[in-house]
Amino acid sequence: VPVWCFGVNNCKIFIYDLIGKVVLDDEISNDSTKLLNVSNLNNGIYMLQIVTDTMSTTRKIVVMK
């Protein structure tokens, strides 16, 4: 899953399962992009949350292999 974070110094990335358990977390710094490896996750629906110092956004993602 590609994730990018521009215009801020640091982004924290969380992927939650539908129960609310964090199944993956990572950080992106200094206006960059990162490819999150979700190969260890089971097929299904997850919530991707990006958190910065000034905002937080959450999106639904679907893992299908």
Image (cartoon, rainbow, N blue to C red):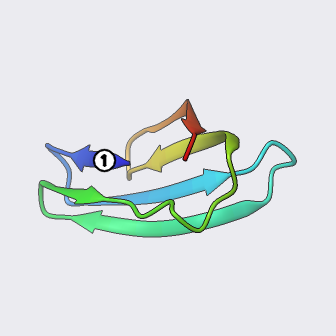
The residue at the far right in this view is 19
The residue at the far front in this view is 65
Residue drawn at point x = 37 percent, y = 68 percent: 27
Which amino acid does the dot numbered 1 rest on?
Val
Location of mark 1 (residue)? 3
The residue at the far top in this view is 60
- Corner quadrant of residue 60: top right
Q: Nearer the viewer, residue 7 or 43?
A: 43
Q: Nearer the viewer, residue 56 or 5?
A: 5
Above or below for 32 versus 24 = above
Q: Position of residue 1 (x, y in %)?
A: 38, 48
- Corner quadrant of residue 45: top right
Residue drawn at point x = 38 percent, y = 52 percent: 53
Q: Nearer the viewer, residue 42 or 61?
A: 42
Above or below for 42 versus 5 = below
- Count of numbered circles in the view: 1
Q: Is residue 48 left or right of residue 8?
A: right
| Element on which disc 1 rests | strand
Q: Is residue 18 left or right of residue 56?
A: right
Q: Position of residue 42 (x, y in %)?
A: 69, 55
Residue drawn at point x = 13 percent, y = 63 percent: 30
Residue drawn at point x = 45 percent, y = 46 percent: 50
Q: Label 1 neighbourhood size at 10 Å, few (<14), some (14-19), many (20+)?
A: some
Q: Position of residue 43 (x, y in %)?
A: 68, 46
